[in-house]
Amino acid sequence: MSVIVKVALLQMAACGVDQASNLSKGEAFCRQAKTMGADIALFPEMWNVGYNMPDPARPDERRTWQEQAVSSDGPFVRHFQALAQELEMAIAITYLEKWDGAPPRNALSLIDRRGDLALTYAKVHTCDWDHEGALTPGDDFLVCTLDTAAGPVKVGAMICFDREFPESARILMLKGAELILTPNACELETHRLGQFRARADENMVGVAMANYAAPQENGHSVAYSPVAFDANGRPRDTLIVEAGESEGVYLATFDLDEIRVWREQEAWGNAFRKPRCYDLLVSPTVEAPFIRPDARR
């Protein structure tokens, strides 16, 4: 019997910064995901405030926005912990996270089907040239063993701009991730979709991304398998599901047995890497034309 894991991509438009309405809407979409047989429900980025960001030039607006941050052990997250336990379904909930002594973080908490926090991850690659300069970046990439009805699965997370850096998914793969969950809040066009497909291929991991629906963003929540060839060696389309622009719950079904066999047999991932040649990848030095005054290291 195959190990099948189903990830529900919750493609929604937010109710502005109305946290109570966002909570209620998110719960309704989670309940729909459960009726569809989902093992994991994945939210778009920073759901509690609908990814509404402050104007960097207006300090008062920034302070008001920061006051909307919630803690990982506060009522918003606890609500989804109780829901995950009730539904016996893991939930990857996203929010503006209160961070002691510093600006808030852009966070995801993965709650297991028993209602326990499996991991809390903060976005590492914040968009520092824009509104996200008001955030505290995360400082690590995390992987956990998620208990599902089909058995344990190694799950990692990255958020939006993280996926545009090969290093994000690479580190998650090196930490053992078999499946990467990715909340999103920007236009998903052909180039970003191509990047995301490549992250699955080059790391031999399944990837799933939930975006905001139109008109807030353009939808196109998507999931890819890494299994690029069939049993006869013929190339295959690795797309599992791609949404349109409308709101909805889009189910991505991952065959973990198939992915695990692929990882054991093929040449990508960590099989033939040459780390001795990669020292420059961790150098903090930035040369022209890539110098940016607002970049944080």
Image (cartoon, helix red, strand yellow):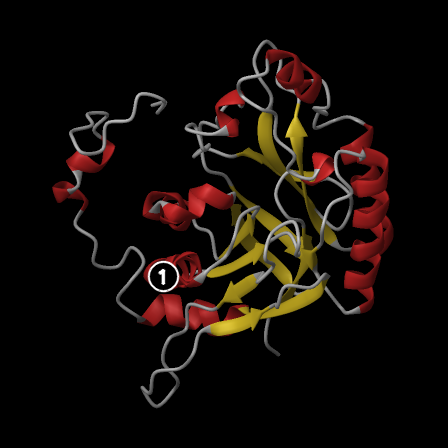
**Whole-percent x and y of residue 232?**
34, 90
Q: Is residue 217 shown above or below 69? A: below
- Seen from the viewer's position, the closer of residues 248 and 7 is 248
Q: Residues within 10 Å of mark 1 (few under 14, many from 20)?
A: some
Residue 107: in sight, yes or no? Answer: yes
Residue 48 appears in which quarter of the rendering? Answer: top right
The kind of residue on which mark 1 rests is Ala
Residue 50 appears in which quarter of the rendering? Answer: top right
Q: Residue lying furthest bottom in this view?
A: 232
Left or right of 146: which side holds 135? left
Left or right of 86: which side holds 124? left
**Whole-percent x and y of residue 73?**
74, 26
Q: Is residue 40 shown above or below 81? A: below
Q: Is residue 36 shown above or below 185? A: below
Secondary structure of the residue carrying numbered label 1: helix
Residue under the image location 82 percent in, 62 percent down: 32
Q: Is residue 249 shown above or below 100? A: below
**Whole-percent x and y of residue 114?**
78, 47
Residue under the image location 79 percent in, 33 percent down: 76
User: Circle 1 is placed at which residue position?
Assistant: 198
**Image quarter (top left, top right, bottom left or bottom right) of the C terminus:** top left
